Amino acid sequence: MNWFLKNKNWFLLIAFLLLNWLILRPILRSDTFFLPHDSTWLVRLHQFDKAISLGQFPPRLAPDMAYGYGYPIFKYYAPLFTLLSWLVFKLIGDYALSVTLVVFLANLVGSWGMFLLGKRLYGFWGGLVSSAAFIFLPFRALDIYVRGAFAEILAINLLPFWLYFFILLSAKKFNKKALVGFILISAGLILSHNLYLLVLACFLPLWLIYFFSSGGFSWKKKILILIGAAFLVLLITAWFWLPLVIGLKDVGALEQAGKTSFLDHFVYPKQLWNWPWGFAGSAPGLADGMSFKLGKAHILLALAGVILIFLNKKSSRLLWLFLGVCLGGLFLALPWSISFWRTMPLLSTIQFPWRFLGLSAPILALLSGGVVLIGKSFFFVRIRKLSVLTALLAVFLFSFFNFKYFAPQKIVLSAQKNLLDREVIYRSSQAVAEYYPAAVIFRPEEKPDWPLAFSGQQTAQVVAETPFKIIFRLNDPGQININRFYFPGWQLFLENKPVSINPEPAIGRIQFEAEEKGEYRLSFVTTPWEKIAYVLTVLGVIILIIVTIF
C-alpha cells in the first residue's frame, strides 16, 4: 500500500492508458473501423489529405465528394478533429487507425482534465473517481459507437479543461497561465464542434455570477480580462468562423437545420435512469432507438458525492455553480423546458435538446468524485484508507456497469478497401447533405465523363484538369456549363480578362455565357474575406504569444 501511495502519478498514467484502451479496443487496430450513424470520417480524412496535396490549405472543398462537383464541407464543419487525424495520418499512413487514435488521444486529454478538476475539489482520489466516471459515461459510448460524433466527443473531452481553467481564472489571484489556457481551450471548442461553445453560452449568467463574485482583483480588471480573452479567441479562430458566418447563405445548412424540430428530440426522465441500448436514431417521444441513460452508478454516486460534500461543509459557490449547470442542462434536455425552447431562438440552433447531456453528464461525473469524502465523514473521523478503498470501488462500479456499452454494432475489416471505395466517396455527401450549395435542387447521381457541358453544338479541348483548376480552349461562343458547383472562390478568366459566372438553376453548376472563343482558365482561389480571416488569425496568434511571454 505504501508503494502504491508513493507512485500515484505512474499509477494514474497507466490507469488512464489502460481504461481508454479498453473502451476503444475493438477499433484501435490497423485498417479496422465500424459503421456508426456518421461513417464518413475516413472519407473526410481522405479528402482532406487530397485537398492539401493539391495545394489547398486550409482545405475548403472536398474534391471527390458529390461526384467530383466540389463539396464545401471543410469550410462549414468544425475542422479540428479532421486536422488532428490528418497529422496522425501523415505519421502512420493508416486512415482508420488515424481516426481512432485521435479519439483515443482526445479521451486521454479529457481523462486528465477531469482528474485535475476533481483533484482540485476533492484531492487525488476524488480526481481519480471523477475521471473514471467521465471515461465510462454512457453518453460518451453513445457518441463514439452509435452516433460516430467524433467532433462532439472531442469537444466533450476539452470541456473538463475549459472548466478547470475557468476556475483558475476566477481565483482571487490573477493567473496568466490560466488565462492563456482558457483562451486556447475556448478556441479548441470553437474549432472542434460548431455548437458546444453555444451550449456553454446558454449558462452565461451562471458563469458570470461565479466569476464576478469570486473576489480577488477588481471588477474593472475582470471585465478587461473577459473582453480580452473573448477578443483573442475570436481572432485566433477567425480563419474558420468568419468565412463560415459570411458564407452560410451559400449552402443549405440553415434550411436543413430548420427541418429538424426540437420538439421531436426531448429526453424523458425514465430514459435518463435506464433505457435499452440500441444503434438506431433519435425519434419523437419514447420511440428512440438509442439510449440517453446517464448511468445508474453515475447518478447514485453523484448524489452520494453531493451529500458528502455538504456533510463535510465543503459546499461553496463552486458546488452551486456545477449543480446549477448540471441541473440546468438536464432541464433543457427534458420536455418540461419546451416553453424556453419556443421563446429563445438561441436554443433552436442547437437542434437536439438531448445535446445538453454532453454538458450535464461530465459534470455529473465530476460530482461523483465527492464520494471519497466518506473517509472524513465516517463517524466524523478522518480515515484515509477508507477514501482510497471507496475510490477503487467507485472505479470498479463505473467500469462494471458501463463497459459493455463501449462496443460497435459491426466491425469493418479492410476499412480502406470497403469504406474508401470510389463510389462510397462520391456518395458520402448524402450523409452530410446540409453543405450542398443553396442553388442545388437536383443532386448529381453520377460522375460526369467530361468537365464541360454545352447547350448547343460548341466544341472545346480540355488542356488541363484538376479538382480545383480547369483550363480549356473553347472553339465556339455560347452558353457553357462546367461540372463544378458554383461557389464563392471560383474564378474564370479568358486570357487575363475576368469572366462573369453564375449558378445554373436547380443544378447549381457553374454557368457562363461565352461571348468569344479562346483559352479559359477556371480556378478555385482564396476569397477576400478568407484572406482577411487568415490575417486576423495570424494577428491573434502573435498577440497571444506576446501575452504569454510578457
Image: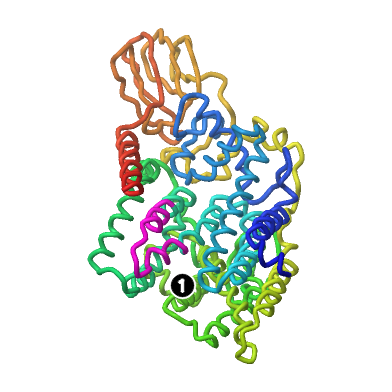
What residue is disc 1 on?
325
Residue 33, given in percent of the width and then of the height, sits at: 71, 44
- On screen, residue 299 above or below 362: below
Q: Residue at x 58, y 51 (%)?
A: 106
Q: Nearer the viewer, residue 196 or 161?
A: 161
Q: Nearer the viewer, residue 531 or 157?
A: 157
Q: Is residue 33 visible?
A: yes
Q: Say which amino acid is labelled 1.
A: Val
Residue 191, given in percent of the width and then of the height, sits at: 45, 48
Q: Which residues are magenta?
A: 164-184
Quadrant location of the N terminus in the rendered image:
bottom right
Asked if the stretch drawn in magenta spans residue 182, the answer is yes
Residue 459, given in percent of the width and then of the height, sits at: 45, 10
Asked if the stretch drawn in magenta spans residue 202, the answer is no
Q: Is residue 265 visible?
A: no
Q: Residue at x 63, y 40 (%)?
A: 98
